[in-house]
Image (cartoon, rainbow, N blue to C red):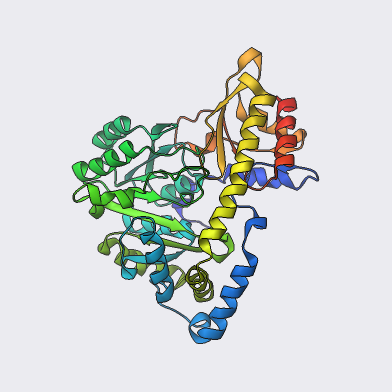
Amino acid sequence: MQFADRLNNVETSAIRELFKLLGKPGIISFAGGFPDSAMFDVAGITEAANKALTEEPGAALQYGATEGYNPLREQLAAFMGSKGVTVAPDGLIVTTGSQQALDLIGKTMINPGDKVIVEAPTFLATIQCFRLYGAQVIGAPIDEHGVKVDELEKLIAEHKPKFVYLIPTFGNPSGATLSLERRKKVLELAVKYKTPVVEDDPYGDLYFGDAPPPSILALSSQVSGSRDWLVHCGSLSKVLSPGLRVGWMIAPPELLARATMCKQFSDAHTSTFAQATAAQYLKAGRMPATLAHVRQVYAERAQAMGQALKRELGDAITFTQPGGGLFFWARLTGANGKLKDAGEFAKRAIEKGVAFVPGAPFYAGNPDTATLRLSFATADVAKIEEGIARLGQAL
């Protein structure tokens, strides 16, 4: 068979390859980027599904509008309103997870050879998605406060990108949160250079202490004209259930129209049953209690992981304690002659029965091979402490 040339731009996911090694009995995995299934509100979702089937069975089981099931769009508009974003139900479309939103952005905006700026590091699937459509993906440096906006401005001025893609709140893989001051600067840059900014926000509700700054979209009311240059992607995957595959995209009308057209070709619409279930769940008002529980559990696990890393690996590793999300982003220092290559470290760790993801694949270019990502979401405190102790032995 002959395949499309565009596939030559995409490599097999290093993370997917790593998952093949996780079938070994007794492996403690910090590799996944998914929520703990024990956190799912099964009773609430069951109740919502039953209501969807009893109150509007025809709508829940029938074909639906490509833009999304209207009762869900209304609930999502209200959900965003609770986070400081004014949006009408017809100002967003429902997508099959926020991953589809990113794919639709790639389909509607990227021509082969276009430049796109992302954080370095950023979500691996985003790099692959944009490259699939022929983009030259350029990494902008970050620190613990998110993307360095002065460096970002230089890159925008030099490369004139089609758009900038950011995960500003508890980023994947970095765990970093863009400061309020930098968020406003990003909005100013969007207007100044007429450059769209895509804000991906799957983790923003998973904070452990104080709430993070408002989303870039919520802040756009403070910078004149900036809303015209913003795209916001949201998801219920990390806070309710990934299996529902419910995400959404808020964007200027002309982009929403083109994205809807491309979605029609792709899947006709997101599962109406999943949408009706999500709509009933949000309508029932269970989300605040669910979020409070999830935040508490993940906060305990993140605290345990940070303490264990300091205790077991000491000065051989550096990291910033995350304030939310699912991830630690760490860097091997090579102190006292210890290992500094995270790829080699990952192999040794598997031999000791613990898994994590080396950081190199998260870079669009010039990877830092000393970096690694650890997720604390799916292991309890005892497993975290045992797993990090094994990492100490592996190092």
Q: Nearer the viewer, residue 113 or 269?
A: 269
Left or right of 69: which side holds 241? right
Q: Residue at x 61, y 32 (%)?
A: 306
Q: Residue at x 31, y 59 (%)?
A: 251
Q: Nearer the viewer, residue 126 or 318?
A: 318
Identify the image quadrant of the C terminus. Answer: top right
Q: Position of residue 110 (x, y in %)?
A: 33, 52
Q: Position of residue 169 (x, y in %)?
A: 43, 44
Q: Residue at x 73, y 30 (%)?
A: 389
Q: Quadrant of residue 118?
A: top left
Which residue lies most toward the top here?
A: 336
Q: Quadrant of residue 316?
A: top right
Q: Quadrant of residue 391?
A: top right
Residue 298 appears in the figure: yes
Q: Nearer the viewer, residue 344 or 165?
A: 165
Left or right of 384: which side holds 128? left
Residue 3's place in the image compared with 285, above or below, is: above
Q: Position of residue 178 (x, y in %)?
A: 39, 39
Left or right of 326: which side holds 189? left
Q: Residue at x 55, y 54 (%)?
A: 292
Q: Position of residue 339 (x, y in %)?
A: 65, 21
Residue 106 appears in the figure: no
Q: Nearer the viewer, residue 293 or 267?
A: 293
Identify the image quadrant of the N terminus. Answer: bottom right
